[in-house]
Amino acid sequence: MVVAELADVGLFGSMDRYGDLGIHAVIDLAKSFSRAELEGALGAAIRAFPVLGRRYVPGFWRDRWQKVEGPVGDAVHVLAEPSDLEAETEKWARRPIDSARERPLRLVSFAHGQGSRLILSITHLAVDGGGVAAVGHVIGAHLYGQAPALPVDSRRSVGSVLEGLRWYHLPVLARDVAGTLALPLKTWTAAKRERHFPTRASQQAIWRHVTIPEGDLERIKARCRPAGASINDALIAALAR
């Protein structure tokens, strides 16, 4: 077993309220791949990032990641072309992954014309957005018989991030640590919400498409710059509302 990181524990504990927070990458390709090729690519990703081959096991003292002994093919689904490709894609995107019982990822392939559509689903419990990009890169490289263009680092600890810092980063690090520690106080002193977040018992994924016209985006950027905020901050604020 591998000991879970603090961020893993926090994300797992929030699932009852927010769901599994998964990420789905959908791509249409001009060619198709056999089950053996897809299983080989997924196996390569698991070897590069071992957490993908494990399930999350809560513990009394420490949560851990335990290796899943079943075949990699359990996480691969090769299907014929459906009558409604978009509806089937949405169906698979809404299908949850139980990270406490199975691997935290899934690869689905639909026949699509002369090619195929791949759906790579990974729970946020295992990787973040950058991690999804790294996993997708390894899978894609393996499918096309290429070596990954960037070195692979399977470590997930905070220490592996901090080792890249130098002495001249310490003032910035101290500032950011102080700001993070102050967040609970800022939250406690914030005004109470006038309306509560809605609650849902369903385990199905929920999403909303948000389109920002170019002119509005430029105005948002102009308003964000003086406050030191980013476009990502504005998007999160929009989703919160």
Image: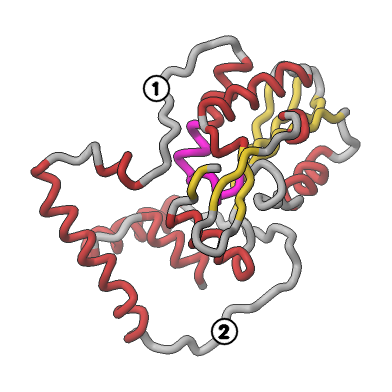
What secondary structure is found at the residue carrying circle 1?
loop
Residue type at the position of mark 1: Pro
Residue labelled with disc 2 = 196
- The image position of residue 207, as x and y in percent, is 65, 58
- The image position of residue 231, as x and y in percent, is 37, 55
Q: Residue 150 vs residue 201: left or right?
A: left
Identify which residue is drawn at 77% across, 45% down: 92
Residue type at the position of mark 2: His
- The image position of residue 150, as x and y in percent, is 40, 21
> Callout 1: 10 Å neighbours few (<14), some, many (20+)?
few
Mark nearest the camera among 2 and 1 is 1
Q: Where does the N terminus fall, quadrant-wise?
A: top right
Q: Earlier in the sequence, mark 2 or mark 1?
A: 1
> Marks 2 and 1, Cα distance to the nearest angstrom?
45 Å
Identify which residue is drawn at 14% across, 39% down: 166
**Observer-nearest of 204 and 73:** 73
Identify which residue is drawn at 17% across, 60% down: 175
On whether residue 169 falls in the magenta region, the answer is no
Q: Residue 113 vs residue 72: left or right?
A: right
What secondary structure is found at the residue carrying circle 2?
loop
Q: Is residue 241 above or below residue 204?
A: below
Q: Which residues are magenta?
A: 122-134
Residue labelled with disc 1 = 151
Q: Residue 188 vs residue 46: left or right?
A: left
> Callout 2: 10 Å neighbours few (<14), some, many (20+)?
few
- The image position of residue 160, as x and y in percent, is 32, 39
